[in-house]
Image: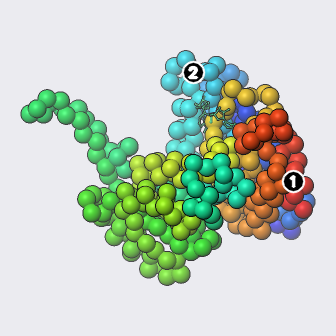
Amino acid sequence: MADVKKIAVIAGDGIGPEVVAEALKVLKKTEELFGYRFETEHALFGGIAIDEKGTPLPQDTLDICKKADAVLLGAVGGPKWDNNPKELRPETGLLGIRKALGLFSNIRPAVVFDCLKEASTLKPEVLEGTDLIVVRELTGGIYFGDKLRREGAGGQEAVDTCVYSVAEVERIARQAFEIARTRRKKLASVDKANVLETSRLWRETVIRVSADYPDVELEHVLVDNCAMQLLRRPSSFDVIVTENMFGDILSDEAAMLTGSIGMLSSASLGEGSFGLYEPVHGSAPDIAGLGVANPIATILSVALMFHLTFGYHDAADAIENAVKSVLDAGHRTGDIAVDKSKAISTSAMGDLIIAAMG
Ligand code: NAD
């Protein structure tokens, strides 16, 4: 019998509880179909935690996450807490949880579903077959280096410093090579090595690490070229690994290839196999409580958890194929429906996906 995997479940605010409920149905169906076993423990985080415990990230929530093998998060935030002081804002908890759990990379898949190709701003023939992952370094680079304002000869000047250590580059490179190994075995390392010293260090380190992954084909792409190639030949990318700021920009560009925010999953990973999995979207206060949110981003986050944390590729493939077949059959929630009068509810979409799993 399979080991019991512990999953901390944080439903959060707004549509969070609605989409997480559908993801939990998928976990249950996976147990029935594949014999895997999950133990879930619910924890408070975000606005609801402010209301009930007086802080966005209570210590017992962190304890539950640290004991778990993975965390499934819905979304946090909403207008009720927007005017709170900084320490009492749900978003402050988001940064805190990543730091406390030692998460140093953000993983964003961009998969174009054939039946939704027409919804993208790019031509369907360019998008054909696009299935890529952006691996973004989260803890270093220009966002975290020294910053200063000073008086220069011509007036005020501002300085932001970009810093990377070999150790930081090496750990993200290894993670990206490992992910590429579970896919089509192609890694594009994105830098600006023709100009930046941190990029030259990045490139040297990635080349050195690549010696341990001879089965993965490595290419180096300059960031400006990568931004163009993502629009010109997105299907030729498999895994893209890059530093913090380039990754921030490229992951949003890649997300736009796919059309709707209700479809995008993500993961934040630390050392080992631990990860936090969540949809890219927020708590969507405008549709919260109506039962109309698209649960696919959260359900695909469960598939990502199976691929990256548990290595349950069979169950992950079953979820991804079920999502494809339900969409191919024409079922849509309101955000992706052309004819809004035919849109189905959050729970109806969840039920169709678990039925399609087998
Ligand atoms: P949002 O992603 O919540 O919503 C943007 C738009 O997309 C809205 O019109 C919404 O209805 C729609 N949408 C989002 N997810 C959807 C889904 N699953 N199905 C159908 N439609 C969906 O972004 P926002 O409005 O800028 O932010 C709302 C709140 O969420 C804010 O408090 C923000 O701070 C928070 N937020 C949280 C996270 C997180 O928890 N990681 C991420 C982003 C924003």
- At 71% from the left and 39% from the top, the residue drawn is 335
- Point 50% across, 70% down: residue: 187
Can you say which quadrant of the picture contains the N terminus? bottom right
Q: Amino acid at mark 1?
A: Ile
Q: Is residue 59 left or right of residue 346?
A: left
- Indicate whether 194 appears above or below 89: below
User: Label 1, on which residue?
Assistant: 354
Could you classify mark 1 by the number of other residues whose Cα lies within 10 Å: few (under 14), some (14-19), or many (20 or more)? many
**Label 1 secondary element:** helix
Residue extending farthest to the bottom is: 214
Q: Is mark 2 within 8 Å of ligand 1?
A: yes
Q: Position of residue 182 (x, y in %)?
A: 63, 71
Quick one: label 2 or label 1, which is nearer the N terminus?
Answer: 2
Q: Quadrant of the C terminus?
A: bottom right
Residue 197 versus residue 288: which sits nearer the camera? 288
Whether label 1 lies within 8 Å of ligand 1 gets the answer no
Residue 82: mark: 2
x and y percent of residue 140 in the render? 40, 50
Please identify the quarter of the rendering in which residue 127 is found: bottom right
